[in-house]
Amino acid sequence: MLFRLLRLVLILALVVSAPPSFEAMAQALGQGAAGLVTDQQKVIQGLTAKTDDLEKKIQQDGENDASLVDIRLQLEDLSRSALTSALAFRSRLTEIN
């Protein structure tokens, strides 16, 4: 259940940070948004790698309650980081509109 929620958050963040159409990308390059997209893609890739590591830990330490609590806390931090990454585009969207 927790992984489904985290994956949903990561997927939403990926959708938000996905490269726009070529016309929009060409326009964004002129306005410096390409750096924002690149930075956020790196952040999301890092979050994905951390999530994969935590999934392996869950499979290894599935019976250890203390370890599972620690993993849950780390997943909550990852969820906040994914939300922060998605919100990085908010200022850019207001500029476009």
Image (cartoon, rainbow, N blue to C red):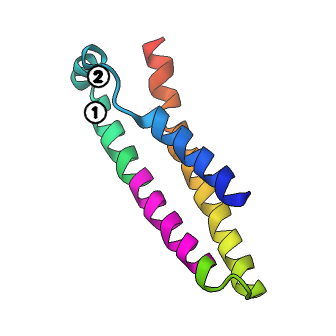
User: Quadrant of the image for the N terminus?
Assistant: bottom right
Q: Is residue 97 magenta?
A: no
Measured in 3D between alpha carbons, the distance from the residue under mark 2 to the one under mark 1, in whole angstroms, is: 6 Å
Q: Position of residue 46 (x, y in %)?
A: 41, 60
Q: Residue at x 31, y 16 (%)?
A: 24
* Residue 81 sits in quarter: bottom right
Rendered residue at 49%/28% (across/down) = 91
Instruction: Find out whether the residues at labels 2 and 1 contact each other: C-beta distance under 8 Å.
Output: yes
Sequence order check: which comes first, mark 2 or mark 1? Answer: 2
Q: Is residue 48 magenta?
A: yes
- The structure residue drawn at horizontal position 53% and vertical position 43%, both measured from the top left corner, is 11
| Residue annotated with mark 1 | 34
In magenta, the rendered stretch is: 44-58
Note whether 43 is above or below 73 in the view shown.
above
- Give the farthest residue toward the top: 97
Out of 7 and 43, give the one closest to the viewer. 7
Residue kind at label 1, given as amino acid type: Ala
Position of residue 90 relative to residue 26, above or below, is below
Residue where numbered disc 2 is placed: 28
Q: Residues within 10 Å of mark 1 (few under 14, many from 20)?
A: some
